[in-house]
């Protein structure tokens, strides 16, 4: 077979050698591998970012729930303070009142048959008393303490030896299991009077209760 080279050797392509082929393949493969690796990193980072964004959204939702709970707790604490002030006010108000029913029942039960109940009158006054401060028990402060007095007015005939009857009545009140421990003092005064033309003696018995009771 004859080969005619009209270009005198200039147009014949150079035969490929294995080394050249390998270099060309490496030159082409390296950018492709780098591109594949970078694409892998990109996809991986995109997935991680997506997961992190979902976690962030979930955390923001949870934070929103907790913020509502915190607001609700703050509201409860505010209401608690209001209720505490109300209870303190109620407590102080209760201290200014007393249940008179058992006291009156004790007076009536011990009243002699020979006298007549004319009137009952409850009075109250206040005295200053030093008490420890709540925030600093080492210090004291002045508070108003109620002192209550129950005035029992009874009438009797001068001929009925009423003085002794009233003294016995006074002694019974002092020794009463319910009323006795609550009393600070009992004083008695008397005056003469007339009712429908008849002479009578009116006794005023002041039962002074201990301060604060």
Image (cartoon, rainbow, N blue to C red):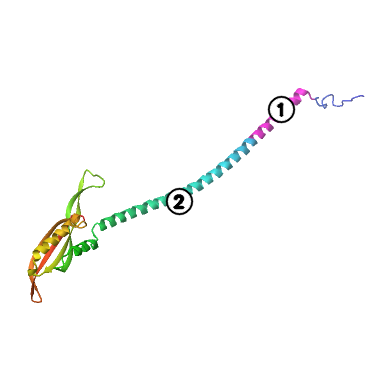
Farthest residue in the right direction? Answer: 1
Instruction: Give whichever of 160, 8 is nearer the camera.
Output: 160
- Report the span colored magenta: 16-38
**Residue sitting at x 18%, y 51%:** 129
The image quadrant that residue 188 belongs to is bottom left
Q: Quadrant of the C terminus?
A: bottom left
Q: Is residue 76 left or right of residue 5?
A: left
As drawn, 47 above or below 142: above
Q: Nearer the viewer, mark 2 or mark 1?
A: 2
Instruction: Give whichever of 69, 35 is nearer the camera.
Output: 69
Query: Residue 182 location, x and y as percent?
Result: 19, 55
Q: Distance between the residues labelled 2 and 1?
A: 62 Å
Residue 26 got which mark? 1
The residue labelled by disc 2 is 68
As drawn, 79 above or below 194: above
Query: Residue 57 location, x and y as percent?
Result: 53, 46
Query: Residue 39 location, x and y as percent?
Result: 65, 36
**Residue sitting at x 53%, y 44%:** 56
Q: Does the magenta stretch include residue 36?
A: yes
* N-terminal label among 2 and 1: 1
**Residue sitting at x 21%, y 45%:** 139
Q: Does the magenta stretch include residue 136?
A: no
Q: In which quarter of the image is the N terminus?
A: top right
């Amino acid at each position: 077979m004859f080969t005619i080279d009209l270009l005198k050797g200039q147009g014949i392509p150079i035969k490929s050698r294995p080394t050249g082929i390998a270099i060309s393949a490496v030159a082409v493969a390296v950018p492709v591998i780098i591109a594949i690796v970078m694409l892998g990193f990109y996809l991986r980072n995109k997935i991680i970012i997506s997961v992190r964004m979902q976690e962030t959204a979930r955390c923001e939702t949870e934070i929103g729930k907790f913020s509502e709970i915190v607001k609700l707790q703050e509201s409860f604490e505010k209401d608690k303070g209001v209720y505490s002030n109300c209870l303190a006010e109620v407590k102080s108000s209760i201290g200014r009142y007393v249940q008179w029913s058992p006291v009156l029942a004790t007076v009536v039960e011990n009243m002699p048959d020979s006298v007549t109940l004319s009137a009952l009158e409850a009075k109250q006054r206040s005295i200053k008393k030093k008490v420890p401060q709540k925030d600093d028990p080492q210090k004291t402060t002045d508070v108003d303490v109620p002192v209550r007095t129950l005035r029992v007015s009874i009438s009797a005939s001068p001929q009925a030896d009423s003085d002794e009857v009233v003294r016995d009545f006074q002694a019974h009140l002092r020794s009463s299991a319910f009323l006795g421990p609550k009393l600070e003092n009992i004083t008695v005064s008397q005056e003469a009077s007339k009712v429908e033309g008849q002479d009578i003696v009116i006794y005023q018995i002041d039962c002074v209760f201990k301060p604060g009771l």
